[in-house]
């Protein structure tokens, strides 16, 4: 659940508004005098079902709890969010906006790194020293010039100050070179080889192949650097952690892989940068790699924006296996555990990962790395990925490899490691199946597994007995955050519309066109009753009205941090949709008709009560309410005709 939803589930709109407006029952709703304009008879309605309010008088607008406090206090969304989170007892991570001078500094560092890409590339392509590196890439790695250019590979010369001198001459300050990670500060007790050097800084990357690392939006973040001389260590050297480079948050190749990942609805994780490049070269573009360490939660959270179907394709060596087993833990924490609250990458919105990921493992055969396999036989790569196994099954095999399965201790050890994975699966049928498979695999009785689990340290706490729970006990065991908020149909449909548009912003114009062809107005922010949906919709519209960037990229960069958690969730909800499916447009169209119709039904119903009230009190507005009702009825007819027409068209 996103933090916004959590707040909504804990604050009842009737309670909130009652504090400043005297409400009285009107059917299933409540009515009162509008707090935003002066009036003698009520034109203000609050709906507990929808958790919304509406003024049918002078204001003629409405919304949810956020909109109410925003309008009442003159706050923006962020201020309203803080206030309501406080009231709901939901803890928000403090949000620290990026200051303009920080932004400027980041831009300058990115500019410097872009120039570094050009510098290293020149060294690779145009210098005799670079020729050695180029030969290695062509012959040993079998990478084409096209692939090298696409990924911007370069060569750092075997020198202590080539980059330092080059960029100092270009006007960069020493501190900027340090901040970018291109040069390193010499420690006092310096290596004897460099004591002759007068400068206190020197090039970090020397005699290495340089691999530019970009964030998911294609902006430079740092470098990965691979040795050419087998005697050098380490084999891979990354940029240090800088303001732009955080190795736990970046995924190599994601800027190029994000679209293919969405299109295939599958992401493949490999271990090496070179594997990513080789696979792209072979036409497998939905591939990324972590920064040489185990997968982190931040990386998975980033990835799941594009797809929740993830295959880990790992090298067969021991390091690869260990990395899987380490990575597994992060994967479970971030994706599988039901109700677990975690913080999203932007550090603001706590969100619950109640959606499962489909996580599979593909093991490379014959001691081959992914790049070797794909260069030998692309079809083999395809089938390896297709036959990737669910994590639980893979772990059983990995743990059993080379061990004596007849040994009771080995059996106990394997089941102790695998059972927690199984118990974490949200689906009881799946849990059952895997328990059976584990029992068969270890050749033990399934009941023995279940009792071992109950004794284990991870055993679930027994359910409180139903008969006579003490009040305190009941309060403690009541789940506080795993409950879904009661969502009204219009809230669900709005969320569905927004989730499709976030995935396919380009569909909005086509949607507008078919709405207009059906004599209806194009989709407007006012069509959304819930503030968060409305804000995201505005952002989608804006992303199309600018042409400096891809709509996708614009959305990512301009997303208010307060909505990041919600957006993650919406994207996850729509991850099973095929983004290339033609029916998405029809889905959108029907969704719009539905929310408009639900809104009109609700308004007509609410107006009936207001009209009766006004009539009893001899208020002239009774007539204008009647007029509004007939106006809404006409709009409702127009909607029905439009949707009928669409159905007929589809049948033709
Ligand atoms: Zn009003």
Image (spheres, rainbow, N blue to C red):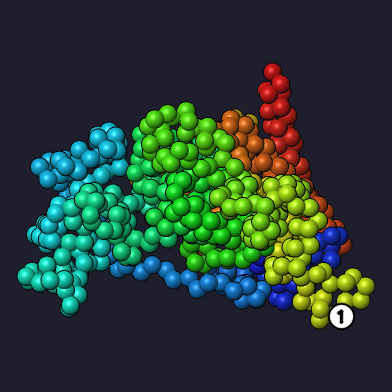
Q: Is residue 648 above or below residue 451?
A: above
- Judge whether residue 241 can be spotted in this image: yes
User: Which quarter of the figure is the C terminus placed in?
Assistant: top right
With 113 as the anchor, is 326 left or right in this view? right
Residue 87: x and y in percent read 65, 76
Residue 159: x and y in percent read 12, 57
With 157 as the anchor, is 555 left or right in this view? right
Q: Is residue 577 above or below residue 412?
A: above
| Residue ranking furthest to the right | 467
Residue 265 sits in quarter? top right
User: Which quarter of the figure is the N terminus placed in?
Assistant: bottom right
Name the residue nearer the viewer: 133 or 211: 133
Q: Is residue 307 above or below residue 54?
A: above
With 259 as the anchor, is 620 left or right in this view? right
Residue 90: x and y in percent read 63, 72
Residue at mark 1: C-beta within 8 A of ligand 1: no
Residue 640: x and y in percent read 74, 35
How packed mark 1 is, by other alpha carbons closer than 10 Å (few <14, some 14-19, many 20 or more), is: few
With 536 as the anchor, is 27 left or right in this view? right
- Name the secondary structure under disc 1: loop
Name the residue nearer the viewer: 542 or 134: 134
Q: Residue at x 41, y 41 (%)?
A: 369
| Residue ranking furthest to the top | 652
Residue 463 sits in quarter? bottom right
Q: Residue at x 58, y 65 (%)?
A: 342
- Judge whether residue 73 can be spotted in this image: no
Image mark count: 1
Name the residue nearer the viewer: 118 or 90: 118
Q: Residue at x 56, y 49 (%)?
A: 401
The residue wearing badge 1 is 470
Q: Residue at x 79, y 62 (%)?
A: 451
């Amino acid at each position: 659940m996103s933090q916004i939803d959590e707040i909504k589930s804990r604050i009842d709109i009737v309670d909130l508004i009652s504090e400043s407006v005297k409400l009285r029952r009107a059917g299933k709703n409540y009515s009162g005098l509008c707090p935003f304009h002066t009036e003698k008879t009520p034109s203000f309605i609050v709906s507990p079902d929808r958790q919304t309010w509406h003024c049918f008088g002078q204001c003629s607008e409405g919304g949810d709890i956020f909109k109410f406090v925003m309008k009442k206090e003159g706050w923006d969304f962020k201020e309203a969010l803080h206030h309501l989170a406080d009231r709901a007892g939901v803890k928000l991570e403090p949000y620290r906006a990026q200051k303009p001078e920080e932004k400027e500094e980041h831009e300058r560092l990115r500019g410097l790194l872009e120039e570094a890409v050009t510098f290293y590339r020149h060294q690779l392509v145009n210098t005799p020293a670079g020729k050695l590196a180029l030969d290695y890439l062509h012959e040993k790695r079998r990478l084409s010039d096209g692939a090298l250019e696409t990924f911007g590979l370069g060569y750092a010369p075997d020198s202590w100050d080539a980059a330092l001198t080059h960029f100092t001459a270009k006007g960069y300050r020493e501190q900027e070179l340090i901040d970018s990670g291109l040069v390193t500060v010499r420690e006092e007790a310096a290596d004897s080889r460099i004591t002759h050097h007068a400068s206190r800084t020197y090039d970090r990357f020397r005699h290495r192949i340089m691999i530019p690392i970009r964030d998911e939006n294609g902006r430079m973040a740092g470098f990965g650097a691979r040795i050419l001389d087998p005697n050098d260590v380490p084999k891979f050297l990354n940029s240090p952690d800088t303001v732009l480079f955080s190795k736990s948050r970046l995924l190599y190749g994601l800027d190029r892989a994000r679209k293919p990942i969405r299109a295939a609805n599958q992401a493949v994780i490999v271990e090496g940068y070179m594997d990513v490049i080789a696979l792209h070269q072979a036409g497998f573009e939905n591939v990324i790699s972590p920064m040489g360490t185990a997968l982190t939660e931040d990386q998975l959270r980033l990835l799941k924006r594009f797809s929740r179907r993830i295959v880990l394709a790992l090298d067969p060596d021991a390091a690869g296996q260990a990395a899987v087993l380490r990575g597994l833990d992060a994967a479970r924490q971030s994706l599988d555990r039901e109700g677990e609250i975690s913080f999203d990458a932007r550090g603001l919105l706590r969100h619950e990962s109640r959606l499962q990921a489909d996580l599979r493992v593909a093991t490379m055969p014959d001691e081959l790395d992914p790049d070797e396999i794909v260069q030998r036989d692309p079809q083999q790569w395809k089938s390896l990925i297709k036959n990737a196994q669910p994590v639980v099954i893979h772990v059983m095999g990995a743990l059993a490899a080379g061990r004596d399965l007849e040994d009771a201790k080995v059996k106990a050890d394997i089941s102790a490691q695998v059972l927690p994975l199984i118990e974490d699966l949200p689906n009881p049928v799946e849990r059952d199946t895997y328990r059976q498979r584990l029992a068969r695999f270890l050749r033990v009785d399934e009941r023995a597994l279940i009792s071992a689990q109950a004794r284990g340290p991870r055993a679930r706490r027994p359910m409180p007995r139903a008969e006579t729970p003490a009040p305190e006990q009941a309060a403690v065991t009541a789940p506080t955050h795993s409950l879904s908020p009661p969502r009204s149909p219009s809230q669900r449909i709005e969320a569905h519309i927004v989730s499709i548009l976030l995935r396919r912003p380009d569909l909005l114009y086509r949607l507008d066109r078919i709405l207009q062809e059906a004599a209806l107005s194009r989709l407007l922010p006012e069509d959304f009753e819930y503030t968060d949906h409305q804000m995201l919709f505005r952002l989608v519209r804006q992303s199309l009205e600018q042409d400096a960037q891809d709509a996708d990229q614009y959305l990512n960069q301009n997303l208010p941090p307060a909505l990041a958690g919600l957006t993650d969730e919406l994207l996850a909800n729509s991850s099973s949709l095929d983004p290339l499916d033609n029916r998405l447009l029809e889905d959108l169209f029907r969704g719009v008709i539905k929310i408009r119709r639900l809104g009109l039904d609700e308004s007509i119903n609410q107006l009936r009560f207001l009209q009766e009230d006004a009539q009893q009190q001899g208020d002239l507005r009774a007539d204008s309410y009647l007029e509004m009702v007939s106006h809404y009825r006409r709009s409702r007819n127009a909607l029905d005709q439009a949707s009928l027409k669409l159905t007929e068209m589809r049948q033709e």
